[in-house]
Structures are given as C-alpha cells and as structure tokens.
Amino acid sequence: MRIFIIYIILLLNTACVFSQVDRTKAPESDTPTPINVGKMETIKLDNGLKIYLVQKTGYPKFTININIEQPAINEDEFPEIREIVNSAFYKNPSTKKYTNKEIESTFKFYGADKGITLNGGFIRGLKRDIDKLLPICSDLLTNIIITEDNIKEFSGKKKKENKKKKNSGKDSKFNKNDYIDSLLYGKTSQKKEIKEKQLNYDNINIGDCYNYLKRRIVTSNTSILIFGDFTKEESKDLINRYFENWEKGKKLPSSHQTKLNKQILAKRKILVIDAPNSSQERISFNWGLNDAPTYFNKHIELEVLNEIFGGSQMSYVYRNLREDKGLCYFVGSSVSPNASGGTGAVWGSFKQGKSEIVIENILLEMLRIKNMDVSDKDLKIAKGSLIGKESRAMSGIATTPYISFSMVKDDYNLPDNYLQTRIPRIYNVSKKDIRTMAEKYIKPFECVISVNGNVREIKGKLEKFGEVIYLDKDGKIFKF
C-alpha cells in the first residue's frame, strides 16, 4: 500500500513538471470570433415618437430610457421656468394620479428603479411588472404637480445667488484654455461667447410652468430605448398604451450641430504661465484637427491611433516619459473628433525643472508616429485593448452603449448595426491606416505648448522650440 501511494505522488509530480508554462513566450491569441452585441431596431409611431428596440431573448429584466431633447440652458427662452420645473422632479414628485408615497412604495415593492426629469429618464425592473411601473413614469412626465412652494423656495434661493454673482462679477480669473483657443483659432472664430442671463422670477406663476412643460414634453423631440425580451409588436403596443396622448409639438433644433473651426496657427508657440509655488510643472500640447467632426468616416482609425500614441499605459508617450524616464506619474493624450472638427492634446504633471526634456520627448514621439510605421506588436496591443474595452462595455446586459447610441443615431445618420460593426472595424485597422492618420492629425509644428511653472527658472530654456509667451497668473505679460 505504501509503495502504491509513493508511486501516485511521483506520478503527480511528474505531471506537474511537464505541465509548467513556459513564461518566456507569450501565449498565442485565439482566432477572433464575432461578438454578439445585440441588434437595435428602429420603430416609428404615428405620433412621431421614435422607439429603439434592443431585444434580449429570455432576459427577465427590462430597461426603458426616455430621451427628451431640450435646448441648451443658455438658449432657453425661459431658463427660470426651466429651473423651477426641474426642481419639481427632484423634490418629492407627485402627480394628479399618484402621490409621492405611492410612487416610491410601488417601485420599492417591485424592486425597481427610476430617474425621471425634464430630459426624460429611465426605469428598470422585471418585465412581468412593467404595466405597474411604466404608467407612473409616463404620468410623472406629463402630469407632475408644481406648487407655489416650488416657485417661492427656488426663486428666493436663486435671487441670492444672482446677488452674489453680481458682487463677484469683477473678479473674473484668467482662463488658460480660452487663451490657447485664441492662439489656435483666432479670437473671433471660436465658439460664440455665452452671456449668462440674469434670472428673474418675478411674476412667474404655476400656469407658466405647466405651459412650459406642455411645450417641452412632446414626441417630436423624444426617443425611447427599450432593452429586454420584447418583440416589435409588444414594444409598439406598450408605448402606444402609455404615450399615445403625448402631443407632437414643435421640433427643437438638434443640440448635436457640427460647426468646424479652422486652425489659423501655422507655427508652434509656447505659453509659460507663472506658478512659482507649484510642486510640479503642468505641461500640455494642443492643436486642432480641422476636419474630423463627430462620427466622421475615420473615427475608428483615429481611436486606434490615439491608443498607440498616448491613450494607454502601453502607448509611446506613456512608456517614454513615465516608464523609461520617470518624469511623471501619468501622461496621456486625446486625438479625437468633435463638433468643431476635432482636437489633439497631450497633458501631464511633471517634475519641477524638467519642462525642456519633457517637451523634447513629446515632440520626439509625435515625429516618430508621424514619420515611421508602428510595429505589428504595438498595433496588436492597441487593437486588443480597444476591443477588450468594447467587449466589456457591450456585455449581454449592458444598456449604456445602446442608450448613448440612441441619443445620437438620427443626428449623425448612423445605421442600426453601428454598434455591431465597431469591433470588426477595429480589427481591420492597418499600419498604413495609422501612418496616414498620424501624418494628417498629429501636428508637432502647429501646436500650442503650455507650461505652468516658475517663469524665472524656465526663461531662456524653451526658445529653441518656438516663440515663447511669458504670462503671470492673471494672464498679463510677465515683467522680469
């Protein structure tokens, strides 16, 4: 018996030796397989309401997200009324049909969740309970009770805030970002100045609030995302039952409007802002992309480019300045599209007195990715990282990507299968794509470099990179 036990032990030890992993070699990746991220279908009702359905067969829960497009607060003709109406949603909301106690107890009883505001909101729960929950949310949006207390309490608070703003209006601080924008795009070509409206609550009554609500809660500016085990027919029936009385109303202009800014800066400039007591030097690079609006046809390639350049801990910039030289705790980049045509940036906080070497090495990495093909390894790591993030975000019960997508789908004319095609598109990005994008959108010679540090110690060290502007903390030319 003892010999038998010894034999078994020896056999197990031998198996362990042969099963050791060779850690000198990275494991081979599996053949990529398609990831099922669910299909979104678009349904339009007769009253103008748009429904986006993401069917999850067999899933017992549901999420319904209601998005009601509202104008920007500075473009709203009645911002005071908007504030009052919004406050009614947040403070013990009741309707003519349901008291606040009934609303809260119902959702608690069914283990459901909600968040309803003037912009719509969401409800989550079990599908079997949806007919108990959805009518409450619909009623909250169209029949919320607004009282004199909402007006009195809110207006009193806001009048005090207006008084404070009036008294402190002369103490406006220097805004570095505005100054950088003026260098890049010119003072008059940037986004229009938003003048803050002086709120006035005098003579506002409950009728004004209800009329405002009636104009804002309309189907022409509303989309509803349904996530769960629903068919098209079930979805249409559900929304028709609880939203059929909504008026179509007047469609507001989309808040997602593209207006390209043209960069006028043709030669690199360095901006040094005095911060003598700072323990670190904050350094940033900023430039405009000019023709990369939101969701333009190469935005996937731009994502991969940024991941390799400075968007991750395996990127060029991070490995150089953080890992190799230990100049900072973190450094990152953003090369991304937006409504004004896209922007590029690199930023981080670095050791005092190191601005010269930091700038030199960031420029080196910009030139490297602009003039040399990336390696197969770096491209593979970047694509794997992005695909991993995408896969986690698009898990079987994740609703956030679908909600975000449904809010912009029509504005940017995106196809129903946009989310499904993102991962294959990332897979297909090539080294040539990265080189092409870098040549066009990485701009080491047409950028603004800003440094927050001790001007007296930095003076004379950065002129080799371009024209240097020295400012004090208030944005005035520094006097040495």
Image: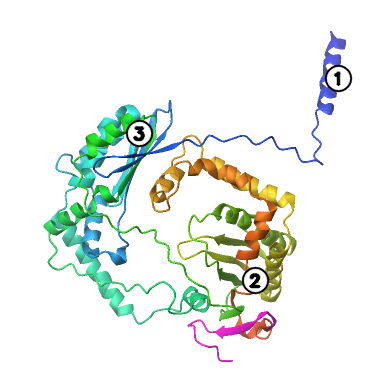
Q: Give residue 226's quadrant in the image.
A: top left
Query: Mark 1 to mark 3: distance in Å?
Result: 56 Å
Task: Look at mark 2 in the image and give the residue it sits on.
Answer: 444
From the image, state whether disc 1 or disc 2 is nearer to you: 2
From the image, state whether disc 1 or disc 3 is nearer to you: 3
Looking at the picture, which amino acid does disc 1 mark? Leu
Residue placed most toward the observer, 173 or 375: 375
Q: Is residue 175 magenta?
A: no
From the image, state whether disc 3 or disc 2 is nearer to you: 2
Query: Mark 1 to mark 2: distance in Å?
Result: 64 Å
First to last magenta residue range = 464-480
Q: Residue furthest right?
A: 3
Which circle's residue, 1 or 2, is located before the other in the chain?
A: 1
Write the residue at 27% across / 50% down: 220
Looking at the picture, which amino acid does disc 2 mark? Pro
Q: Is residue 463 left or right of residue 55?
A: right
Q: Which mark is residue 125?
A: 3
Measured along the vertical axis of the image, is residue 359 above or below residue 467? above
CB atoms of marks 1 and 3 within 8 Å? no
Q: Position of residue 357 (x, y in %)?
A: 71, 73
Write the residue at 63% across / 47% down: 385
Query: Mark 3 to mark 2: distance in Å?
Result: 51 Å
Write the residue at 32% across / 62% down: 72
Task: Look at mark 1 in the image and give the residue it sits on.
Answer: 10
Write the residue at 81% across / 31% down: 20
Looking at the picture, which amino acid does disc 3 mark? Gly
Q: Give residue 44's quadrant in the image.
A: top left
Residue 21 visible to the viewer? yes
Q: Which mark is residue 276?
A: none
Q: Is residue 138 left or right of residue 387?
A: left
